[in-house]
Image: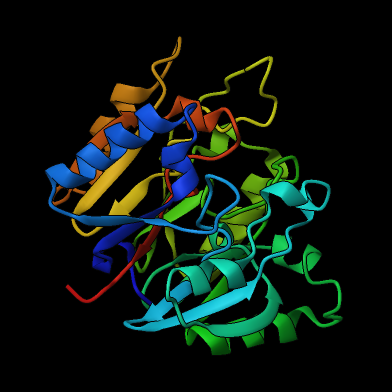
Amino acid sequence: MITGKETNTVYFSEKLRSDERFTKTCNTLTALIEKHSIKYGFLKATKAIWCRDYMPIQTDKGKFIQFRYEPSYLKDEPEFQSDPKEVYKANNINPLFSRINLDGGNVVNWSDRAIITDRVFDENPDYSSKAKLISEIEKLFEVEIIVIPQIKSDLTGHADGMVRFVDRNTVLGNDREKEYKYWKIGINKILKENGIDYIDIPFLEHKEKNYPDHAIGCYINYLEVENLIVIPIFETEKNRDQEVYDKFRVIFPERKIETINYNKIGFYGGLLNCTTWTIKADK
């Protein structure tokens, strides 16, 4: 599969630019991307600012897998559920189609392995065999699939808000000591079984009265493209912004690290990885 560092182009939903609530943040982010001479564009025919989840997943240069996009958390909000077929037709993308229901935000990958959460089983009840479902995904991606526990209280149950690959045998993720005990036990078991080291990253336990499903405080949901990593910062009381930035500088000494206050988007439940679709395109 294509790793984050191998991608060279970023796409956003056109809604991120056109919705006045997010225009300023969008302009700040695109300015950062321009600063590093990275190509970007805007996707047509989208219904929401998010795009990672309904866009196809790139497995090789020019090869994309389009999964079914029918997340349970949007079953009562069809107005926010973009139609992948309309999107890829409007943007001249030609993916291979799979009947498996899987969000792009629930796929975190290295070149030969990928992590998804067990939410995939909830979203595909027609598969009586979990092993068969995982086997089919492995064949599509041509990589090893590692299944980790979802955070049960999380609306989406996605992997991209919990862990990201540093290299094949190292991931970084939310501080396990601050997570639910069942998740800590579950993730530690999977890490040991697969020989993966884990770097604990601080996160905020932040309350927003008007936005109960916000993503404020999750530093793991960052943008990675080419040699650039853009981390969300929150500038709230008791934030860990500087600490996390310093930690990323140590973890990724050869990468360019930028930050952006992404709260305007974070209020609605997602952050940088959620609002971007990164691919390896012909230059």
Vertical relation: 271 (above or below) 135? above
Q: Is residue 175 visible?
A: yes
Find the residue positioned furthest to the top: 237
Give the residue at x 42% y 80%.
59
> Left or right: 209 with respect to 113?
right
Q: Is 102 in front, or is 143?
A: 102
Give the residue at x 28% y 66%.
7
Give the residue at x 44% y 76%.
93
> Left or right: 122 with respect to 63?
right
> Left or right: 84 with respect to 252?
right
Q: Is residue 217 visible?
A: no
Give the residue at x 51% y 72%.
88
Q: Is 104 in front, or is 163?
A: 104
Residue 177 x, y percent position in the rendering: 56, 34
- On the rendered image, what quadrant is the N terminus found in? bottom left
Q: How many marks?
A: 0
Residue 217 x, y percent position in the rendering: 50, 28
Q: Is 205 in front, or is 214?
A: 214
On the image, which quarter does residue 11 sit in?
bottom left
- On the rendered image, what quadrant is the C terminus found in? bottom left
Q: Is 193 in front, or is 8?
A: 8
Residue 200 x, y percent position in the rendering: 43, 41
Vertical relation: 212 (above or below) 162? above
Residue 122 x, y percent position in the rendering: 80, 63
Q: How is the image coloured?
A: rainbow
> Left or right: 59 with respect to 86?
left
